[in-house]
Image (tube, helix red, strand yellow):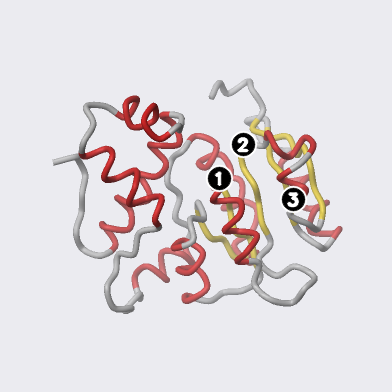
């Protein structure tokens, strides 16, 4: 993505002051970031201008009082780059969000610098691990890690059988950028399980 082309973001949060604050941070970004849609519900990112956003920033605690896992699942199923941005500083919640396919997990306490960096990384399909998430990775003792999502498994298996990422994309109906995103997520999960996979071999 050219640096002169604004990164388009959809913001899902039920607190107007949070939406206004994030939008002001983005407005001050050296590299242009444009909020194309904002509001309290999933439709912000699935209809209207938000459909074409490069990145979706999702508050995990919306008005209904339970974690917005169904919303996250739906966005990931639509192959969206989702940054979970929440007050909840929980290892289990962070890892659950990644298992569901979130691009990354940020606590609101981590602030402007990390949200800006994560947004640009998501737009460019580069991995980004903020401090809270790194801590969750480092202390994850759940049995059987790494856990890959069904789509990650599908992309990984197709990549093993293909000569190029372009062929993977053609076979699965994905862009090369999206294929790279899935493979980066798989690499990160394996690396954090002590099984680094820096190349296809």
Q: Which residue is mark 2?
A: 54
Q: Tell me whether the residue at label 1 lies in contact with that at label 2, contact meaning CB atoms closer than 8 angstroms.
A: yes
Q: Tell me whether the residue at label 3 lies in contact with that at label 2, contact meaning CB atoms closer than 8 angstroms.
A: no
Classed neighbour count for the residue bearing mark 1: other residues with Cα under 10 Å, few (<14), some (14–19), many (≥20) = many
Q: Give how far across and how far down residue 80 sits, in percent.
A: 57, 44
Which of pointers 3 and 1 indicates the residue nearer the eye? 1
Q: Which residue is mark 1?
A: 81
Which badge, 3 or 1, comes first in the chain's sequence? Answer: 3
Q: From what the image shows, is residue 17 above or below residue 163?
A: below
Q: Residue at x 66, y 71 (%)?
A: 87
Callout 1 secondary element: loop
Left or right for 38, reference 140: right
Which badge, 1 or 2, comes first in the chain's sequence? Answer: 2
Q: Give how far across and how far down residue 178 sits, in percent.
A: 45, 36
Q: Residue at x 34, y 43 (%)?
A: 155
Based on the displayed image, in which of its 4 quarters is residue 194 positioned? Answer: bottom left
Classed neighbour count for the residue bearing mark 3: other residues with Cα under 10 Å, few (<14), some (14–19), many (≥20) = some
Q: Nearer the viewer, residue 150 or 142?
A: 150
Callout 3 secondary element: helix
Q: From what the image shows, is residue 71 above or below residue 75?
A: below
Q: Which residue is mark 3?
A: 22
């Amino acid at each position: 993505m050219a640096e002169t082309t604004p990164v388009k973001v959809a913001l899902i949060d039920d607190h107007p002051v949070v939406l206004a604050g994030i939008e002001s941070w983005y407005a001050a970004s050296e590299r242009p970031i444009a909020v194309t849609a904002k509001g309290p519900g999933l439709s912000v990112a699935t209809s209207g201008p938000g459909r074409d956003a490069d990145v979706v920033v999702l508050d995990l605690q919306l008005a209904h009082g339970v974690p917005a896992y169904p919303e996250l699942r739906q966005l990931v199923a639509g192959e969206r780059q989702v940054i979970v941005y929440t007050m909840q500083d929980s290892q289990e919640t962070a890892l659950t969000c990644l298992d569901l396919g979130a691009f990354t997990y940020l606590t609101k306490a981590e602030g402007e610098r990390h949200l800006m960096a994560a947004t640009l990384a998501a737009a460019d399909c580069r991995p980004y691990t903020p401090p809270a998430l790194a801590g969750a990775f480092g202390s994850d003792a759940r049995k059987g890690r790494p856990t890959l999502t069904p789509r990650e498994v599908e992309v990984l298996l197709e990549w093993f059988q293909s000569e190029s990422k372009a062929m993977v994309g053609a076979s699965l109906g994905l862009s090369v950028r999206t294929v790279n995103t899935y493979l980066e997520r798989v690499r990160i999960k394996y690396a954090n399980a002590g099984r680094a996979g820096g190349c296809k071999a």
